[in-house]
């Protein structure tokens, strides 16, 4: 009898295993790289779909306080038509407000608390545990190092989840993805638009240097850091934490992704190393945890090695750095301060 398969999961895995994206990187020199990028990047960005309608920001600061040597602010801001966000801004308490200081957008990943632990909210045992588990308060630590840091919740997290009809896990990411694609958008395009809106506002502050902006994020935040940089050239330096792997593995075997991380036809065009490589030759720091249980080392390092090939072809190898640590799914934090200091320095 003919052997047959009735499993849709096995069907998708079989497709992915033998699939080669259209823009799989094969260039060997800078000219080839530039030709590859000029063709691939517009198509990749087009997968985001439409962006939500813009709206006046109407920023309103609701509270300012001091915490651990930092001045922290909480703002309400309209990030697009029909939707607002809470924006947190951290800065050193002794910051010279007469000078322009570089700012870093700190993107949160998955978890129940959104931006709060990233920006240093340790006001409960649960928040403290979340921070300790992943060295998660990089928005706090980078402000302690002298930067202005800022963050919002992506849709489906913390202040921006529909709690009256709460779903478990990442289901809100997937629910919103379905809603968005019905309207010609994606969760990515919506979140990118919101990230751009708060960056517009933060860049307008008297003490922020709009020409020295960085972005960083862990896991789902690494996804957002990557897409924010691809979509907005104002970001001069990018740190992607624990978001390196190969789509055919983490997307179709591990199912370690959700609706906030994908766009229609994305894997048809590029694999994750190529998606990261479209940033070349711009400065990029990749964090990989040897003991990461989400993006395991067996997939993360092949991703990074292919990324290195792209940066080498782009004559950008000096702008690519790796923080390989013994951590799990967490911010290594060993090179971040020096990396951003190098690329966000005052020219």
Image (cartoon, grey):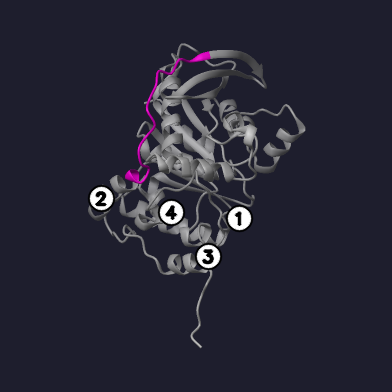
Q: Label 1 vs label 4: CA separation? A: 19 Å
Query: In front: 65, or 19?
Result: 19
Q: Quadrant of residue 146?
A: top right
Q: Determine which residue is flagged by label 3.
A: 9
The magenta region covers 45-60
Q: Could you tell me which secondary element the residue under label 3 belongs to?
A: helix
Mark 2: secondary structure: helix
Per the rendering, the mark at residue 120 is: none
Q: Nearer the viewer, mark 2 or mark 1?
A: 2
Task: Identify the residue at the far bottom of this view.
Answer: 1
Q: How many marks?
A: 4
Of the residues tagged 3 and 1, which is closer to the observer?
3
Is there CB contact under 8 Å for labels 2 and 1? Answer: no
Q: Is residue 341 visible?
A: yes
Q: Which residue is mark 4?
A: 272
Mark nearer the N terminus (4 vs 3):
3
Residue wearing tag 1? 290
Q: Which residue is mark 2?
A: 39
Q: CA distance from mark 3 to mark 1?
A: 28 Å
Looking at the image, is mark 2 or mark 1 earlier in the sequence? 2
Mark closer to the chain start, 3 or 1: 3
């Amino acid at each position: 009898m003919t052997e047959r398969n009735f499993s849709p999961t096995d069907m998708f895995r079989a497709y992915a295993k033998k699939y080669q994206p259209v823009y799989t990187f094969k260039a060997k020199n800078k000219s080839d790289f530039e030709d590859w990028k000029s063709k691939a990047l517009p198509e990749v960005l087009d997968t985001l779909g439409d962006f939500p309608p813009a709206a006046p920001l109407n920023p309103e600061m609701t509270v300012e306080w001091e915490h651990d040597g930092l001045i922290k602010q909480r703002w309400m801001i309209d990030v697009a038509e029909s939707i607002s966000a809470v924006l947190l801004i951290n800065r050193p308490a002794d910051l010279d407000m007469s000078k322009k200081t570089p700012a870093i957008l700190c993107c949160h990943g998955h978890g129940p608390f959104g931006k709060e632990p990233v920006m240093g909210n340790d006001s409960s045992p649960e928040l403290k545990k979340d921070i300790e588990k992943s060295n998660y308060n990089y928005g706090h630590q980078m402000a302690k190092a002298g930067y202005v840091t800022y963050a919002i919740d992506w849709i489906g997290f913390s202040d921006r989840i529909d709690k009256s009809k709460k779903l478990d896990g990442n289901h809100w990411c997937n629910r919103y993805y379905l809603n968005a694609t019905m309207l010609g958008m994606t969760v990515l395009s919506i979140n990118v638009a919101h990230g751009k809106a708060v960056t517009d506002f933060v860049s307008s502050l008297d003490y922020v240097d709009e020409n020295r902006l960085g972005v960083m994020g862990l896991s789902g935040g690494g996804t957002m850091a990557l897409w924010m940089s691809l979509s907005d050239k104002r970001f001069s330096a990018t740190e992607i934490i624990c978001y390196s792997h190969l789509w055919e593995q983490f997307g179709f075997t591990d199912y370690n992704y959700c609706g906030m991380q994908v766009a229609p036809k994305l894997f048809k065009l590029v694999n994750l190393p190529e998606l990261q490589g479209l940033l070349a030759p711009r400065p990029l720091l990749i964090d990989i945890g040897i003991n990461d249980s989400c993006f395991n080392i067996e997939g993360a390092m092949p991703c990074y090695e292919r990324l290195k090939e792209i940066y080498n072809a782009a004559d950008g190898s000096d702008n690519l750095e790796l923080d390989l640590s013994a951590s799990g799914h967490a911010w290594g934090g060993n090179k971040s301060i020096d990396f951003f200091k190098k690329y966000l320095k005052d020219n």
